[in-house]
């Protein structure tokens, strides 16, 4: 009989503890979910930014090779090859500028997310 009362009291305490946790408002639950989502979103944005920066390094190396090839073609008098190299260089430079614009946009977006997260907390 004594054990039955102890178990009943423990069950009652457990139910009260679960009920107290369940009394959190819907806003509290929503805030907790949004915080996790925003942290995960920022992680993905940082990963995307690192990939973009790696692409920029690769593009810059490609542009340096194109410039060296263009200079060699000009020095040797190969006008047709120099024209092709110049077109390739211009295309690569446009792609690099587009990638740098994307990085600036991503950085601005991350900054705004950080600021809104700080205000929201």
Image (cartoon, rainbow, N blue to C red):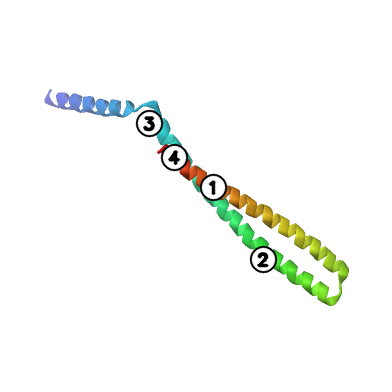
Q: Secondary structure at mark 4?
A: helix
Residue at the spot of label 4: 36
Quarter where residue 59 is shown: bottom right
Give the mark nearest the N terminus, 2 or 1. 1
Dot 4, crowdedness within 10 Å: few (<14), some or many (≥20)?
few
Q: Are marks 2 and 1 in contact (CB under 8 Å)?
A: no
Q: Position of residue 76 (x, y in %)?
A: 84, 77
Give the mark nearest the N terminus, 1 or 3. 3
How far apart, in angstroms, are the residues tagged by discs 1 and 4? 14 Å
Q: Is residue 43 above or below residue 12?
A: below
Residue depicted at x 60% and y 48%: 105
Q: Is residue 83 above or below residue 120?
A: below
Residue at the spot of label 2: 61
How far apart, in angstroms, are the residues tagged by discs 3 and 2? 50 Å
Q: Is residue 92 above or below residue 120?
A: below
Residue at the spot of label 3: 28
Nearest to the observer: residue 106 or residue 20: 106
How far apart, in angstroms, are the residues tagged by discs 3 and 4? 13 Å
Residue depicted at x 80% and y 65%: 85
């Amino acid at each position: 009989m004594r054990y039955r009362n102890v178990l009943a009291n423990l069950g009652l305490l457990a139910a009260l503890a679960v009920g107290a946790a369940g009394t959190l408002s819907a806003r509290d639950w929503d805030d907790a979910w949004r915080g996790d989502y925003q942290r995960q979103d920022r992680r993905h944005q940082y990963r995307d930014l690192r990939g973009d920066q790696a692409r920029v390094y690769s593009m810059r190396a490609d542009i340096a090779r194109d410039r060296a090839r263009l200079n060699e073609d000009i020095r040797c008098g190969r006008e047709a090859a120099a024209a092709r190299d110049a077109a390739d260089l211009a295309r690569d430079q446009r792609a690099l500028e587009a990638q740098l614009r994307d990085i600036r946009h991503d950085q601005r977006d991350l900054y705004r997310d950080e600021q809104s997260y700080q205000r929201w907390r």
